[in-house]
């Protein structure tokens, strides 16, 4: 069956299925769903956990054999499988379906996918989990709902944000729930128990170098090469993980691709930006970027961004900062017409 994320906690208090699938491209919410399932499993006697990352060289037959060869004194265990994409291949699909068919009360299977299921929701292995267990698909927080989500998150940490403060923080994190959660926790360390207004939030984020990730994204849209690489150097020196930067760049490339397609098919740019959740302060930058990012170039950039994301997640070996720099160079390269002058 399918269980919405907001109802997962209630489901877990009533019963525990034998297999779960958690999928979505909101890392914070996916991790929280997984934590809820693990905690419920521990309450019912599952004391050990095996984590398997199904990369290209992963041996599915070993996973199935391990599940079949339980010791007489084995404890109840969680078998957690991490998939990079919702396409585990024929062997992976068959193995997951076989695990779903097993009648083994001593093993709980959890499959986690860091992407939306999309068309994979109709695949054999997903249908097997849906039939024998629970599918939890994580959906992004709507742009208009983000300030309220931030306020609720803050309240859970005994921190009160005014509506204007929550709106300002929402605009700064621009949909990145992990970044929002980190900033709320940081604020709670110094201001728990009192109300925070917009001015204090703005001062707080202005003094937080982590927001240079978003400043870098703005510099890329503006085509400011020198400023972009100066910010990148600073982020690297501060220990910011390349995945954080890749997430923001991937988001912007996807957004530009959607907008270019919409305008090319007769849509109004202002309306398209509103529907894509482009914050007002970024709209001039987006208009400027769209003037140089045409359909063919955006298609190539989407492919390059996907390759970079895969490399940074360890799908294939690559030097993280070099890979990220290559993507930035591709983004900052002038259009063909400008280079021909």
Image (cartoon, rainbow, N blue to C red):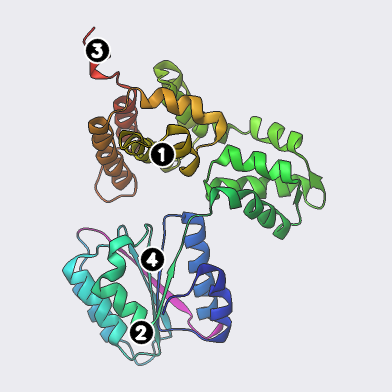
Which callout, 4 or 2, points to the residue nearer the camera? 2
The mark nearer the N terminus, 2 or 3, is 2
55 is within the stretch colored magenta: yes
Q: CA distance from mark 1 to mark 2?
A: 38 Å
The mark nearer the N terminus, 1 or 2, is 2
Query: Which label number is shown at residue 112?
Result: 4
| Residue 92 in the image, given as x and y percentages of width and height | 22, 70
Q: Nearer the viewer, residue 226 or 172?
A: 172
Determine if residue 195 is in view.
Answer: yes
Q: CA distance from mark 2 to mark 3?
A: 58 Å
Tell me if 249 is positioned left or right of 204 in this view. left
Q: Residue at x 41, y 39 (%)?
A: 242
Query: Which label number is shown at residue 132?
Result: 2
Q: Residue at x 52, y 46 (%)?
A: 176
Q: CA distance from mark 1 to mark 4?
A: 22 Å
Query: Which label number is shown at residue 242?
Result: 1
Q: CA distance from mark 3 to mark 1?
A: 29 Å
The quarter of the image holding the N terminus is: bottom left
Which callout, 3 or 1, points to the residue nearer the camera? 3
Mark 1: few/some/many CA within 10 Å (<14, 14-19, 20+): many
């Amino acid at each position: 069956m399918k269980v919405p994320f907001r109802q997962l906690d209630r489901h877990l208090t009533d019963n525990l299925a034998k297999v779960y699938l958690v999928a979505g491209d909101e890392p914070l919410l996916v991790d929280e769903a997984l934590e809820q399932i693990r905690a419920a499993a521990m309450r019912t006697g599952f004391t050990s956990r095996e984590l398997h990352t199904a990369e290209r060289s992963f041996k599915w037959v070993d996973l199935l054999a391990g599940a079949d060869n339980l010791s007489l004194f084995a404890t109840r265990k969680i078998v957690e499988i991490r998939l990079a994409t919702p396409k585990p291949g024929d062997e992976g699909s068959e193995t997951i379906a076989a695990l779903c068919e097993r009648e083994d009360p001593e093993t709980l299977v959890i499959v986690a996918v860091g992407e939306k299921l999309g068309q994979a929701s109709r695949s054999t292995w997903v249908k097997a989990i849906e039939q024998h267990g629970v599918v939890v698909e994580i959906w992004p927080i709507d742009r208009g709902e983000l300030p309220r989500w931030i306020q609720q998150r803050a309240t859970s940490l005994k921190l009160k944000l005014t509506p204007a403060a929550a709106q300002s923080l929402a605009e700064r994190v621009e949909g990145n729930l992990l970044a929002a959660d980190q900033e709320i926790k940081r604020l709670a360390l110094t201001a728990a128990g009192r109300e925070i207004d917009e001015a204090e939030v703005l001062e707080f984020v202005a003094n937080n170098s982590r927001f240079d990730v978003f400043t870098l994204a703005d510099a890329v849209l503006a085509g400011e090469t020198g400023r972009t690489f100066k910010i990148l150097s600073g982020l690297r020196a501060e220990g910011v993980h390349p995945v954080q930067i890749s997430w923001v760049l991937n988001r912007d490339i996807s957004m530009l691709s959607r907008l270019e397609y919409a305008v090319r098919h007769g849509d109004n740019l202002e309306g398209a930006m509103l529907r894509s959740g482009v914050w007002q302060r970024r709209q001039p930058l987006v208009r400027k970027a769209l003037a140089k990012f045409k359909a063919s170039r955006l298609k190539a950039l989407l492919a390059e961004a996907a390759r970079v994301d895969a490399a940074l997640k360890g799908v294939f070996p690559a030097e993280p900062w070099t890979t990220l720099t290559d993507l930035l160079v591709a983004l900052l390269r002038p259009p063909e017409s400008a280079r021909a002058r």
